[in-house]
Image: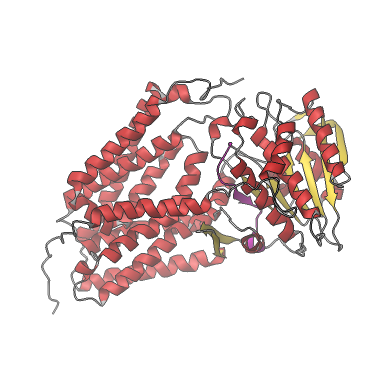
Amino acid sequence: MQIQLSRPPDHRPPYWLPLTIILSVILFISILLWFEKPPEPRGIDAPATEFSAERAMAHVEQIAQQPHPMGTPANAEVRAYLVEQMEQLGLNPDVQEFNDRLKTKYVDADIQLTNILGVIKGTKPGKPLLLMSHYDTVPMAPGANDASVSVASLLETARAIQAGPPPQNDIWILLTDGEERGLLGAEVFFRDPKHQDIGMIANFEARGSKGSSFMFQTSEGNDRIIEEFARAVPNPVSNSLLVDLYKQLPNDTDLTVAIEHGLPGLNFAYGDGWVAYHTPMDNVENVSLETMQHQGENALAVAKHFGNLDLDGLSSTSDRIYFNMFGLLVHYPAQWALPITILFALIWLAFAVLYTRISRFTLKGSLIGVLVPLLSAVLSTAVSYGLWILIYKLWAGKMTQYSGAGATYDSFLYSVSFILITLIIHVASIRWILRKVNELEMLLSGAFLFLLLLIGSTWFLPGASYLFAIPLLAHFIVLTWAIFTRDPLESLNHPVVVLGTALVPVLMFASVFHILFILLQPGIHLFSVVLVALILALMSPAVRILAHSWKWVLPAAFLAIIVLLGIGWSQAEPGPDRPVYERR
């Protein structure tokens, strides 16, 4: 005979816990992003074998004096400077001219361009490592970041390598022409049969003017490349979600061409300060030495590691799932995603059966626990979309660049506002159902929604599955511990449980949201509102605590939105420091 236990009253939290939750979330996000920030730039007195942003900056000042698109006299002047610098470095530059008909997915025309290839000789025979960037620009931008910083970084990298012991493999330095016209220099280079036996490629790009240099793309079958990348780079910023998302986007770089030719590789770029992208603002004054130091350190680390690695068989038939956390790259085989998903589904089902048998998990409570977050997600998306339309019409529209890719000044402020709107709506919804659904029902319901996301990501975006698997693992540990306590419901209100179930999802998603917010337009950020609502459902112990303190939590969140929007509105006037350029 099963004993039916009455639903206990909702547990009141300690008075200090709500504020502790909020401050802990802010603190952990700050620490995580601190580990991702670019390093301090090294001066001209840095050791010869190390990368120096100040030494590299001298090249940027020469290259990025004016726009230099393919086929212009300015382009020829930049090329002459680069050839001279490569000769001084002993790279014996090969100036590869092309003047013929070229047909690609972007063009079908007579093309004249010039690639530059330098070589650092290795000590052993084997496949070469190729470091690559492009030296042409769009017509309206001097191209200090896109991509003079990367070109200068490769020159400084070549100098640093030659100041130390010679590498095992040949290291090629390729500076392509015509990238901005449709990856034309890369098409010409990789169609040449002489260039088909490259061991690995590292491409360096930019989509902004500051921020961390992150690795956002790999070739297919990246299992061994990621293992070696984790060993090579001292401060990696990357995750496998970026790779899977990039495959779905229409964007291309020179590495795209190399991958189409079956060559393995990595792609690096930085994207904060997007408003300068492809505008006259992409000038020397808007170059971040910290960012160039990070880009250059990545290039040098890749050169030193892969330049001394046997590059035969670097390609693989399998991939890895990976993400950076506190300066390390955590990675595991992608083949684990499906077994993990099946196992977690069985574990959730076992918990549901177990807690149903002790009358702590009911059908009514679980349905409410699932439907409320979904309704919160829909309502939050609608409100955020309406707010963005209003902001855009009132002031953000006149602060949006039309010459680049639609970047809006202060877009990060608006994205954070969308998250706060979601928090307000979700906390208010939970306040409404506090005595209808117990702590366990809410936690299992949130875990169920995350389980659905894990199943979907394993099927469609396996590189994103870690985002859902690791928080679920933390919650399953909590649910297992609760079984052995006197009162499972009371145990879920323990401060350690409340903070732990809140901080694990925050740590997993903070970096992803940060990267996406600086790379995408605010209108696209609205998709994150749905995900935030589901993350809050998983963080139900903490959200219940905030719901108990709604009288100050909701006004505080609303005030924060007003402050963020006020900052954006107060700066919404184009001027010399914040110019807006029309499309040409």
Camera-side residue of 358 and 132: 132
Q: Residue at x 50, y 40 (%)?
A: 518
The image shows residue 519 at horizontal and vertical percentages of 52, 40
Residue 349 is at least partly visible in this image = no
Let me know if residue 512 is in the magenta part. no
Q: Residue at x 44, y 56 (%)?
A: 508
Camera-side residue of 387 and 351: 387
Determine the residue located farthest toward the front in the rendered image: 45
- Direction from residue 354 to residue 412 in the image, left or right: right
Residue 161 is at least partly visible in this image = yes
- Direction from residue 539 to residue 229 in the image, left or right: right
Quadrant of the rendered image containing residue 9: bottom left
Placement of 325 over or under 111, stated as above or below: below
Quadrant of the rendered image containing residue 348: bottom left
Placement of 11 over or under 146, stated as above or below: below
Q: Residue at x 19, y 47 (%)?
A: 550
Determine the residue located farthest toward the bottom in the rendered image: 1
Camera-side residue of 444 and 9: 9
State which region is magenta.
208-224
